[in-house]
Image (tube, rainbow, N blue to C red):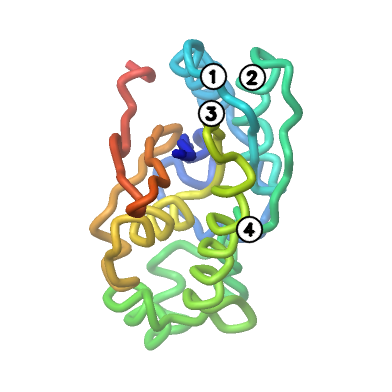
């Protein structure tokens, strides 16, 4: 049997429009465009038979998932495994601000993210471990079904690294735009990715 995953990055917020800021665990809301994108995701997936919808417990992900949940008459199930990486002391900073404050940390994050750990925050290794645990939990639970996961850019890219068998330092080789959709499956022989970073529904 196969478990089919629809992996979704949340819609736009004011913190990832223009000069991006490290969001992490700051509960930034969707902006007007982000809310419109959430509706377009629901329309894009109108013909999918979805058995469960899981989201990071942040309002930007929960509100991205809600139109899809409303259309399916399903609850959005918050899951801590989908939380954004905890960026600790760089929370709220732009990349340039973080570079000035923590040059060594940012050198790692931008060039070797797999070994990075944010001061007062989370290591990439710890985040990756909870992604693997999430997949190990949900794949057998939803065997033969399709489920949607709504999460954050870094978590999306890291999850796709896991299912593609890429090393953690390959993180930045996988682009994940706001409100994009990815499809992958857990089959008997392992994971198979069938669609990545699709944003055609936003045009």
Q: Please state the horizontal and vertical placement of residue 46, each as a whole percent of the image.
A: 51, 12
How far is mark 3 from mark 4, CA to CA? 22 Å
Q: CA distance from mark 4 to mark 1?
A: 23 Å
Q: Which residue is mark 4?
A: 81
Question: Measuring 38% from the left and 41% from the top, which residue is drawn there?
Answer: 184
- How many C-alpha atoms fall within 10 Å of the one at disc 4: few (<14), some, or many (≥20)? many
Residue ID for mark 3: 34
The answer to whether mark 4 and mark 2 are in CB contact below 8 A is no
Secondary structure found at label 4 = helix
Q: Specify which label sits upstream in the sequence, 4 or 2.
A: 2
Judged from this view, the residue extending furthest toward the bottom is 104
Q: Residues at badges 3 and 4 in contact (C-beta under 8 Å)?
A: no
Q: CA distance from mark 2 to mark 1?
A: 15 Å
In the rendered structure, find residue 67 and report the number of the disc placed on it.
Answer: 2
Q: CA distance from mark 3 to mark 2?
A: 12 Å
What's the CA distance linking mark 3 and mark 1? 24 Å
Please state which of residues 168 and 192 is positioned toward the viewer in this rendering: 192
Quadrant where the C terminus sits is top left
Residue, disc 1: 49
């Amino acid at each position: 049997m196969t478990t089919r995953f629809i992996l979704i990055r949340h819609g736009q917020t004011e913190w990832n429009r223009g000069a991006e800021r490290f969001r992490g665990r700051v509960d930034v809301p969707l902006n007007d465009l982000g809310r419109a994108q959430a509706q377009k995701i629901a329309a894009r997936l109108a013909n999918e038979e979805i058995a469960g919808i899981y989201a990071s417990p942040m309002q930007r992900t929960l509100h991205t998932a809600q139109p899809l949940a409303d259309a399916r008459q399903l609850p959005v199930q918050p899951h801590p495994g989908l939380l954004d990486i905890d960026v600790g002391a760089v929370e709220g900073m732009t990349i340039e601000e973080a570079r000035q404050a923590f040059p060594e940390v940012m050198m790692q994050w931008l060039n070797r993210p797999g070994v990075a750990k944010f001061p007062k925050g989370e290591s990439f290794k710890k985040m990756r471990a909870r992604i693997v645990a999430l997949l190990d939990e949900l794949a057998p639970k939803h065997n033969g079904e399709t489920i949607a996961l709504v999460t954050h850019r870094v978590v999306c890219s890291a999850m796709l690294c896991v299912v593609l068998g890429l090393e953690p330092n390959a993180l930045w080789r996988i682009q994940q735009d706001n409100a994009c959709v990815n499809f992958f499956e857990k089959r008997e022989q392992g994971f198979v990715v069938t669609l990545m970073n699709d944003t055609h529904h936003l045009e």
